[in-house]
Image: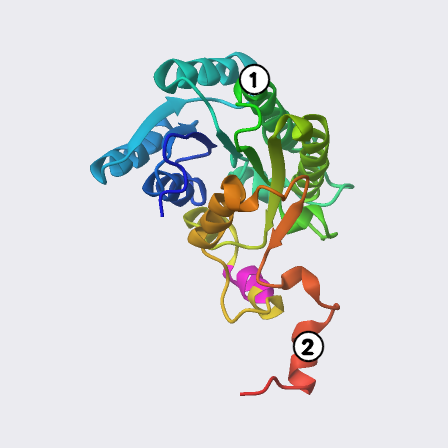
């Protein structure tokens, strides 16, 4: 089903674990897709894959900490395609270095805190700032922001990342409120732990096992799971969904604490 024929989508972090399959899915459904990423070689590879499958994609090298590069990304997109219908703000600071240094507030590395907000929140805000004036009014324009279930719940580590994702959820509501009557929707997705290549590199196996034990599905999410939700929220099928944060975490956030331990006392039916 070609839900996005004639539409143009920007995917930030488009070379990454969630961004790449999302960009490919949008292209498969008819969109012309901009692959925006600091990893330009990776962006070119994704764009080449889309082109090889008969789609249209444009890789753009962009650093979300640099306002002028974000503005240039929007100008380049408009120059190439003449419009922007979908903006998927997926890029975030997910480096192994940041993960290792992002702990509790008392031991917080302020540089990590600042970078989390500079990339995850400020970068997303600027992408919206420069894209919104060019999105068509009352024609199904959609912004989707990747938040996290860590932005909804407290944790022992990743205080900076979690706080930045909570801020993104509120930014989502603000944009939906200010631009909803213009026919521009803005929603957020809060994934749980998704098995990307980066997760495999940065998240210890013992931690993955703990999260999996607390997840209600018999598996952890895949990038494709998130891509399908993005495509839905970007489509006209979701035209009455605005200002919402959709938790996509296999049910991890839906149950009382101690679920994994209680299963030992009350085994699930086989």
Residues 50 and 253: in front is 50
Residues 218 and 183: in front is 183
Q: What residue sits right under mark 1 in the picture?
A: 130
Residue visible at 71% across and 36% down? 173
Instruction: Look at discs 1 and 2 and give the one toward the viewer.
Output: 1
Query: Picture coordinates of residue 29 (x, y %)?
Result: 36, 42
Position of residue 146 in the picture relative to residue 18 (left or right): right
Residue visible at 55% across and 35% down? 92
Instruction: Kindly check if marks 1 and 2 are in contact, taking CB atoms under 8 A apart as contact.
Output: no
Where are the magenta residues, as a range? 205-211
Can the viewer see residue 86 in this picture? yes
Residues 225 and 232: in front is 232
Query: Picture coordinates of residue 175 (x, y %)?
Result: 68, 29
Q: Crowding near pointer 1: few (<14 within 10 Å), some, many (20+)? A: some
Counting residues from the N terminus, which is met first, the one under dot 1 or under dot 2? 1
Residue 261 is labelled as 2
Position of residue 11 in the picture relative to residue 242 (left or right): left
Secondary structure at badge 1 equals helix
Q: Crowding near pointer 2: few (<14 within 10 Å), some, many (20+)? A: few
Position of residue 183 in the picture relative to residue 88 (left or right): right
Position of residue 11 in the picture relative to residue 118 (left or right): left
Can the viewer see residue 96 in this picture? no
Q: CA distance from mark 1 to mark 2?
A: 48 Å
Query: Picture coordinates of residue 209 (x, y %)?
Result: 54, 66
Secondary structure at badge 2 equals helix
Residues 59 and 100: in front is 59
Q: How many marks?
A: 2
């Amino acid at each position: 089903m070609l839900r996005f024929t004639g539409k143009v989508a920007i995917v930030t972090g488009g070379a990454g674990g969630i961004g790449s399959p999302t960009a490919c899915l949008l292209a498969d459904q008819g969109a012309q897709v901009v692959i925006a990423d600091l990893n330009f070689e990776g962006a070119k590879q994704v764009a080449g894959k889309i082109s090889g499958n008969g789609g249209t994609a444009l890789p753009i090298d962009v650093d979300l900490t640099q306002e002028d590069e974000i503005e240039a990304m929007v100008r380049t997109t408009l120059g190439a395609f003449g419009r922007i219908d979908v903006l998927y703000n997926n890029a975030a600071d997910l480096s192994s270095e940041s993960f290792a240094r992002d702990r509790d507030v008392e031991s917080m590395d302020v540089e990590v805190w600042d970078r989390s907000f500079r990339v995850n929140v400020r970068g997303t805000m600027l992408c919206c700032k420069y894209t919104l004036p060019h999105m068509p009014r009352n024609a199904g324009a959609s912004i989707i922001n990747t938040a996290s279930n860590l932005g909804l719940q407290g944790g022992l580590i990743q205080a900076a990342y979690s706080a930045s994702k909570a801020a993104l959820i509120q930014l989502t509501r603000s944009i939906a409120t200010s631009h909803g009557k213009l026919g521009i929707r803005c929603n957020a997705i809060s994934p749980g732990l998704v098995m990307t290549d980066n997760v495999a590199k940065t998240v210890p196996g013992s931690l993955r096992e703990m999260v999996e034990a607390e997840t209600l599905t018999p598996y952890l999410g895949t990038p494709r799971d998130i891509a399908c939700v993005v495509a839905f929220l970007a489509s006209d099928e979701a035209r009455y969904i605005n200002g919402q944060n959709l938790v996509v975490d296999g049910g991890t956030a839906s149950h009382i604490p101690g679920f994994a331990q209680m299963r030992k006392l009350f085994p699930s039916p086989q």
